[in-house]
Image (spheres, rainbow, N blue to C red):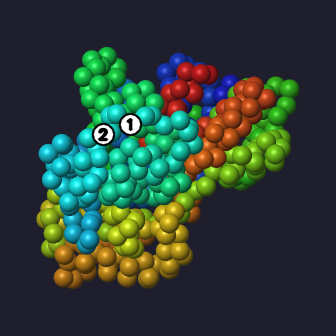
Amino acid sequence: MLNTDVLIIGAGLTGLSCAHYLAQKNRDFLVVDKKAEAGGVIGTAHENDFTYETGPNTGVISHPEVADLFDDLKDLMTLELADEKAEKRYVLKNGKWVALPAGLVGGITTPLFTWKDKFRLLGEPFRARGTNPDESLADLVKRRMGESFLNYAVDPFILGIYAGDPAQLVPKYALPKLYNLEQEYGSFIGGAIKKKRKEKDPETKKASGKIFSVKGGLSNFVRALQKSAGPVKCLPGVQNIRIEKNQNGYLLKGINAEGSPLEIQAGKVVSTVGAYALRDLFPFITKENLAQIEKLHYTRVVEVAIGFKNWKGRPLDAFGALIPHREKRDILGIMFMSSLFQDRAPKNGALMTVFVGGVRRQELCELDDEAIKKLVERELKDLLELEAFDPDLLKIMRHAKAIPQYRADSQARYASIELLEKSFPGLILAGNIRDGIGMADRIKQGKMIANQI
């Protein structure tokens, strides 16, 4: 039997970030994961002169903790910020690409929004703040900005992040910065202006909002975290993991990578698994106490990496292309990976990632690989002005539980998590069941948990 103070279940970004900070404090811990390789959903592949991601493609430096972690790991990996092209995003309207406006003049002249809503926007700073904490994102945006802003700015943005539906997501949990902007300042516009004028402390300035990856792909990020935590601290390939509660804390039982029984006694357990895996992992927690957490819905997404060694379509001079749901296309959006980061495709070539499915188009995830290929071919030939669709790389990745949807049931889920942690001292329920879904959120949470421990 092994003994440790802290047992972390899951070697994804949350678990490894937590491990990194525990290692800095010389705390005793072990990380256990059922997969043979660490990283969770993060993965990078190299094939036919292309470097593509098999899970998340990019992150955003939206919290100071992200910048701090990269500084810690600078000798183990090389941070890569996206090219300035990332500042531009295309939105599809009536079959044509329109650059999403970045300033006041662009917002007035863009064809994305109606003149009614543009004039209505003048009154946004004077509208009363919302009083319903469970108000949907769609209702919030329509109330403050108008329907065209919802349809051609917020909706495609949400499809790019959550693959979700603004009518179902609740900003208090899904987009807390947006929610707090209205609650603290009473206005999106007024709040943004006041925050910009407010002098930021050095720590806050670290949250640059820049899009990031790592030289050679995000798998190098995972390897750097493993090295910083210590390779002997991570046990991969552990199957049939169950946690029992006993007088000394918690006892893990499972089968190690060699097929032998494994037992680990720990004083504290940090779970980073999805809501759907908690019941099997913690059989001592009643079904009733897990019910609210298990209501968390995960949407399916199909991710397609496509590479061309000689690109002959329209210029890929942006972060990518966002496609509003009302345009009735069969893809959620496109990321122009080779335009954002170096060495992702051969010179004069192109690498992109196409997303299919999401909350409102789950039926597309049922298509077989050949049908997915035909769907992508049809859409890209039309949208990217391709005469022939002859990619040198086409890889289909299916994510059955891709992105959790923070809906109106989030408050009850958070309350259940808090109750369980109080009921079982030393148990911490983390991961994407709370505190956000982005890479930055996972890093921030990992550091927060390490500090808590």
User: Of 174 and 202, which appears nearest the observer?
Assistant: 174
User: Compared to 366, does 346 lie above or below?
Assistant: above
User: Compared to 218, does 204 lie above or below?
Assistant: above
> Dividing the image into 4 quarters, which one contains the N terminus?
top right
User: Of 175 and 239, which appears nearest the observer?
Assistant: 175
User: Compared to 240, does 223 lie above or below?
Assistant: above
Q: Amino acid at mark 2?
A: Gly
Which quadrant holds residue 379? bottom left
Can the viewer see residue 149? yes
Q: Residue at x 19, y 75 (%)?
A: 385
User: With 107 as the anchor, is 185 left or right in this view?
Assistant: right
Which quadrant holds residue 102? top left
Q: Residues within 10 Å of mark 2 (few under 14, many from 20)?
A: few
Image label count: 2
Q: Residue at x 46, y 41 (%)?
A: 175
Q: Residues within 10 Å of mark 1 (few under 14, many from 20)?
A: few
Which quadrant holds residue 320? bottom left
Residue 157 placed where, x, y %?
36, 53
Residue of label 1: 127
> Answer yes or no: do the residues labelled 2 and 1 have beta carbons within 8 Å?
yes
Residue 179 placed where, x, y %?
45, 37
Q: Residue at x 27, y 17 (%)?
A: 199
Q: Amino acid at mark 1?
A: Arg
Residue 36 placed where, x, y %?
57, 52
Residue of label 2: 123
Element class at badge 1? loop
User: Of 352 and 200, which appears nearest the observer?
Assistant: 200
